[in-house]
Amino acid sequence: MEKMNKPSKIFLALITLSVLLVIIATAYKFLWLKDYNFYVEAVCDPEIEICFYRDCSIPDDCPPNGLEHYRAFEVPAGDFSNCSDNSCLAECVSGKIQCNELICDESEGYECSFPTNLYEELELEVEAQDAILEDPQAE
């Protein structure tokens, strides 16, 4: 086997060092700092809350939690161990851990379910605004 010349050895050492640095930096970020978020789903009551919706009539289209109507949260990985269950609902709602609740938005391509009383309130608001626009003296 031929001996490697000096520039080849230096190049190989730099590549090896670079790969090791990337591995160490990644391990530090994800294993030590836990600098990432978990996406978790929690139970949602479509009668009183705006919920994400998915059709679970076909079992393969649903995740193992089986939730058709659900709320979604982003939970910091470092805080996930403080959750009493995999949904972290109690901790997120109480403010025990910092969660970011994701709000269902149909304009982003999600299916949402809205409480029926919310529709009624919005309709009343729109009717009131329309009445004011038609007759500004009616205020």
Image (cartoon, helix red, strand yellow):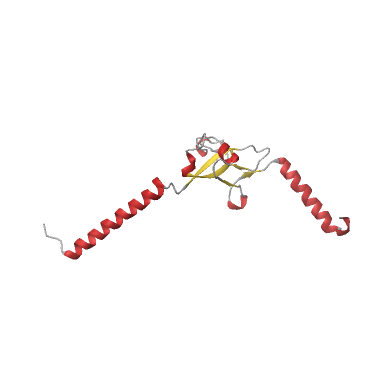
Residue at the spot x=37%, y=51% of the render? 26
76 and 74: which is toward the camera:
76
Residue found at the far right of this picture: 137
Q: Residue furthest bottom?
A: 7
The mark total stands at 0
The foreground one among 126 and 88 is 88
Q: Is residue 122 above or below residue 8?
A: above
The N terminus appears in which quarter of the rendering?
bottom left
Q: Does residue 19 appear left or right of residue 56 in this picture?
A: left
Residue 68: percent from the left, percent from the top?
58, 37
Task: Tell whether 76 sits left or right of 4.
Answer: right
Task: Give the x, y percent position of residue 19.
Answer: 30, 55
Q: At 26% from the left edge and 56% from the top edge, which residue is drawn?
A: 16
Residue 129's quadrant in the figure? bottom right
| Residue under the point 20% across and 63% down | 8
Residue 118 at x, y percent in the picture: 72, 43
Q: Where is residue 40 in the image (x, y as percent from the top left)?
A: 52, 41
Q: Of all residues shown, which one is farthest toward the left?
A: 1
The answer to which of 40 and 13 lies nearer the viewer is 13
Query: Splitting the image into 4 quarters, where does residue 94 fall?
Result: top right
Quadrant of the snapshot with the C terminus: bottom right
